[in-house]
Each structure stands twice: as C-alpha cells, then as structure tokens.
Image (tube, rainbow, N blue to C red):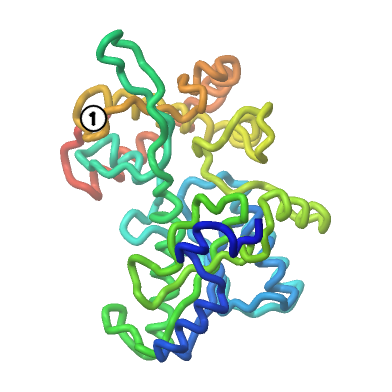
Amino acid sequence: MPFKQHKKYINGVFKTKQEIIDHCHKQGKNDIYHVLSFGAGTQSTHLLEEHFKGNIHYDYIVFSDTGAEPDFIHQQVDWWKERQKEYGNTTPFITTHHNSMIHGLEEMLFRYILTDYQRFQMPLYFNRIDPETGKEVQAGMTPRQCTVDFKIIPVKQAVRQLILKKYGLKPRQRFPKNVAIIQDIGFSYDELNRVSTWQSPQYRYIYMSYPLVEMELSTQDSIDYLANNNMPLRRSRCYFCPFNCGADRDIGMDWEEIIEEEPLSFLKAVYFDDKLRRIVKSGNKNLRNIPYFHYSRKPLNEVFPDEFRAIVIKYYSEFKAWEKEWISFISDKYGGDLVWTT
C-alpha cells in the first residue's frame, strides 16, 4: 500500500522529510542539518550513492563503528570513501562509536559476562524452562536495542558535537534554539516494523527521516540498485548477529559467510554464545531465559561442528590472545575483581 495509508504514518509514528522540515520552520528552527546514518550495508549505501549523484542532500555522513562488524564491512566503508573522492564530493565523512563503551558490542558483552553489569543490549533467541517438564521451550527474542544504542545514538551525539563546535560552543553548552538535525535512517519499506518515532527521545531538536520508506523501496530494491551498478553488496551486521541464518535462507547474510571469510570471528561468536548461557544459568543476571545466537536455538558449535573443530585447531592461539586482552581491559576499566573469568 502507499506509505501514507500505513497505520504508522496515519498514527503519526513517522512523518515525511518535508513534513519534518515544515515542523522545524514552525518551531523557529531555520538552520537545518541533514545527516546520513551510514551503516555500510545495502540501504544506507543506496542513499549515499544518491547523495553523491546530487539527488539527496547531506551535510554529514556518519558511520558508527559498533566494534563488531566483520572486516568486509570496514572494507566497504573504505570503498565508499574512495567512491566519494571519485565524485569530488566533500561532505564530511565521519566515524564515531558508543560514547562510553568505545569498543562497542564486544565490550558490552565482555562487561556483561565478566562484571555485575546487567543491561543486555542486543537481540538473541531465547528459551525458557517449562516448570512442569523442566525442559527448554521457545520464548521469543529480546528487542533489537543495539541498533539504537550503538548506531543511531552515537551518530546523533557526534553531529551534535560538530554543530556545537561550529557555533563556537562547548560540549555541554545549550544547543542553539534555531538549529535542527534531520537524521536519515536506511530502513526500507519492508522494515516499517523497525520505525518507532520521528522525534529523537534523546534530543528534542533531532528528527528521524526514512527516505526509502517514502520512496516505498524494499531491501531487495536497494540490493538490486547496487548490483546493477556493480557496487558492494554485503549486508551490514555484526559478526555474531542473530539475524545471520543458514545459507538455505535467502536473506542476504548467513553464518556460512562469517565462517568462510571471518573464521576467527566465528570462533569469537561461539565463545559469546556459550559464555552467555553459562552466566545466565549461574543466576547472577536479571536475565533469566536461556540465550542462543542461532535461530535453531542450538549452540553454534553444534550447528556447525566440523567447521568449529577446524577453526579451533587453526586459530586457537589467536583466540586466546584476544580473550586474555579483553579480560585485562575489562578488569582495568571497570575495576578489580571480576565476577567470572573462566
């Protein structure tokens, strides 16, 4: 259906970019900055290419590093920076990160596992224990908070600081009343379930716009757009993203791709998959249901047993060095005694 007939638009959950601009003008906000929240996947790169072609205006392009993207996503960021040079485009292209957990989702997971930190900020598949049978039964998924906390909010914070500096203001000074920020998010029309607001809950002068929704374009439309122009097609996600599926599920990203191209990252995902269940079962967390990274609700090393064994043999020393480094970092940053280190 046309997006204006969708209940989320009718109920005011989101507005068109022009409606947001009109709203800003009525509020006396005539200095409006347009920002692309760049994820280096398919939808936001579609918008970026349109910007390079002069069809969409942006004042800033901001990539928020979640600390857990595969190397091939960072390679795509570099590809698009080169593309920008080819166009002669001079829009500031910025990389940012979570404000307090600067190493991103890996830091969050280690903090959750090793300390008494209780906030869990990514979606996983969960089972609960049936009190009558004592067996695990499916219990849904946790909310997809990681996109907001590690991508959208860091972009808002980075642009806010840039504009304060431009106005000659210090980081904690009051934001200029005449300024607004419109942040374009690359959700496509088939992802309308992810659209939750057009006004930032954190900053009253920041607004969210969804150009692909307005254009009524699907994820596949963006993939086709990139494919037809010989551009990178990797879907943006973290290496342990639970929305990775099997190669038999044609959604554009799968565990097999991580296993083949990022084997050490797959070993890290197996580690987190196992350790999270252990720490939850210990009873030291508010989280009570049993988490799984794979949609089958089986341990990753059991879903891919042959691949796991081969990777362990080849990458064990690198993996242990990574684990040791993280344990030391968490101990130094969050203080002394760790809840669990084995």
Residue type pointed to by label 1 = Trp
**Residue 51 position within the rendered picture, expressed as x and y whole percent measured from the top left:** 68, 73
Of helix, strand and loop, which one carries label 1? loop
Q: Residue at x 82, y 58 (%)?
A: 229
**Among the 4 quarters of the image, the one containing residue 283:** top left
Circle 1 packing at 10 Å, graded few (<14), some (14-19), many (20+), is: few
Q: Residue at x 36, y 16 (%)?
A: 136
Q: If the image is split into quadrants, where does the C terminus sit?
A: top left
Position of 280 relative to 43 (above/below): above
Image position, residue 171 (x, y; %): 31, 78
- In the drawing, does residue 112 fall left or right of residue 158? left
Q: Is residue 168 above or below residue 143?
A: below
Q: How far from the left and from the top, in percent, is residue 244?
A: 57, 35
Residue 139: percent from the left, percent from the top?
Answer: 38, 27
- Direction from residue 253 to residue 320 in the image, left or right: left
Image quarter hosting the N terminus: bottom right
Residue at image position (44%, 81%) is 180
Q: Is residue 287 left or right of residue 85?
A: left
Drawn side of residue 54 relative to residue 339, left or right:
right
Observer-nearest of 60 and 210: 210
Rendered residue at 54%/37% (across/down): 243
Residue placed under numbered mark 1 in the picture: 340
Of the pair 145 and 162, the residue shown nearer to us:
145
**In terms of image quadrants, where is residue 263?**
top right
Q: Is residue 342 visible?
A: no
Toward which corner of the image does residue 200 lie, by quadrant? Answer: bottom left
